[in-house]
Structures are given as structure tokens and as C-alpha cells.
Image (cartoon, grey):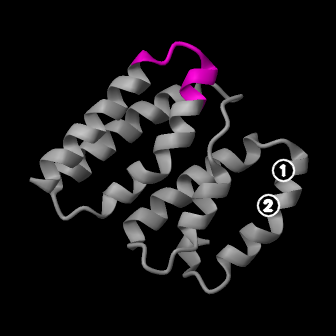
Amino acid sequence: MYHIDCRDQLERVFLRLGHAETDEQLQNIISKFLPPVLLKLSSTQEGVRKKVMELLVHLNKRIKSRPKIQLPVETLLVQYQDPAAVSFVTNFTIIYVKMGYPRLPVEKQCELAPTLLTAMEGKPQPQQ
């Protein structure tokens, strides 16, 4: 039952993304749903993981053509630091931190730099 609920939730996020007409709407949806969607990559259900991957592919296409859209880098950094997170989740979280960090205003980048460096301490080389 759980995996059906997860897939339904992911489908609703997909629909919200599809209905976002402005960059502001898209950014709000991404800020709210990207971190929890990434956590669904730890699901034991292949159907859930497959749906997450479909959603991320769609999201990537929309994000890459809109460089002004901000990603929830601070929330993603917290998620990245979670020692309980499976490596698959951590690896995808890194992708979105790397994508989102350069989009931040320089002041915010400077503010988050110490957190970013601290987060990387003790991580395996591929996850830095």
C-alpha cells in the first residue's frame, strides 16, 4: 500500500510541476518538493524509484532552461549531511546542491560556504 501512496504523491508533484506557468510558481514547487522527492530514492519499491527518476528528468529539463530559478540549497545541505541517508539519495542531493549553489546570490554563497565545507568533511571523495 505504501508504494502506491508514494507513487500517487509523486504523480501529484509531477502534475504541479506541469501546471507551473511562471518561474516563481516553478521555484515554489521545487523548494517545497525537491528535498522530499529525493528522499523517495531510498524506497525499496522499484516503481517508486522509477517515478522519482522520471520526475527528476522532467525537472532538470525545466530548471536548466531557467537559470534564475533558485533551488532549496540550504535544505539540500541539511539532507546531504544526514548520516542515515543512503548513498543514492546523497548522490542526487549533491547534484542539486551543485546545480543550485552557483544560482545563489554571491552574499548567500559566502554565507553557505562554511556550511558546505563542513558538510563535505568525512564524506567519501565521490560525495564531495
Q: Are marks 2 and 1 in contact (CB under 8 Å)?
A: yes
Q: Is residue 54 above or below residue 120?
A: above
Q: Is residue 122 magenta?
A: no
Q: Which residue is mark 1?
A: 108
Q: Residue furthest top?
A: 21
Q: Amino acid at mark 1?
A: Lys
Q: Which residue is mark 2?
A: 112
Dominant SS in magenta:
helix
Q: Amino acid at mark 2?
A: Leu
Taking 89 as reference, is 68 left or right?
right
Q: Is residue 28 above or below residue 56?
A: above
Q: Residue furthest bottom?
A: 122
**Range covered by the magenta-colored residues:** 19-27
Give the structural element (helix, strand or loop) at label 2.
helix
Query: Image quadrant of residue 56?
Result: top left
Q: Position of residue 4 (x, y in %)?
A: 13, 46
- Using the numbered discs, state the Cα–Cα distance from disc 2 to disc 1 in whole angstroms: 6 Å
Query: Image quadrant of residue 113?
Result: bottom right
Q: Is residue 21 magenta?
A: yes
Q: How many neighbours does mark 1 have within 10 angstroms: few (below 14), some (14-19), or many (20 or more)?
A: few
